[in-house]
Image (cartoon, rainbow, N blue to C red):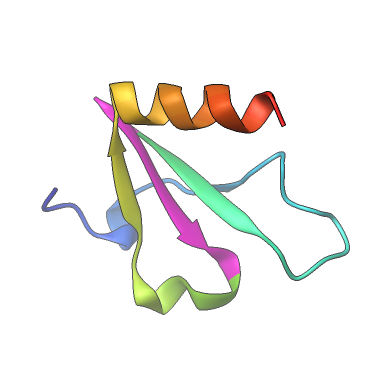
Amino acid sequence: MPETSHELQFRKSSYSGARTQDCVEVADLPAGAAVRDTQNRELGHLTFGSAEWAALLSTATRR
């Protein structure tokens, strides 16, 4: 996707620890989501289509 991180509205994931270094930020896309590492924002983000994002969340919530 041609979008860049500064155009997206990232929020800290509710799955990120409040006191840990393991933080992930998520931004909604029209057809999916973008994910980036809070500690390394300058490295960009990964994008997931709707089906892939739904599959990832489904798998993550079963663990």
Question: Residue at the spot x=46%, y=71% of the render?
Answer: 41
Against 16, residue 52 (above or below) is above
Image position, residue 52 (x, y; %)? 33, 30
Question: Residue at the spot x=32%, y=60% of the render?
Answer: 5
Residue in the foreground of this view, choosing between 6 and 48:
48
Q: Is residue 30 visible?
A: no
Residue in the foreground of this view, choosing between 5 and 19:
19
Question: Residue at the spot x=46%, y=59% of the render?
Answer: 36
> Looking at the magenta stretch, what is its main secondary structure?
strand
Identify the magenta region.
Answer: 29-38
Please state, as top left, top right, bottom left or bottom right, where the C terminus lies in the image.
top right
Q: Is residue 36 magenta?
A: yes
Image position, residue 19 (x, y; %)? 88, 63
Residue in the foreground of this view, choosing between 26 and 55:
55
Horizontal side of 25 relative to 30 (left or right) equals: right
Horizontal side of 37 relative to 43 (left or right) equals: right
Image position, residue 2 (x, y; %)? 11, 53
Residue lying farthest to the right in this orientation: 19
Question: Residue at the spot x=48%, y=49% of the render?
Answer: 10
Q: Is residue 40 magenta?
A: no
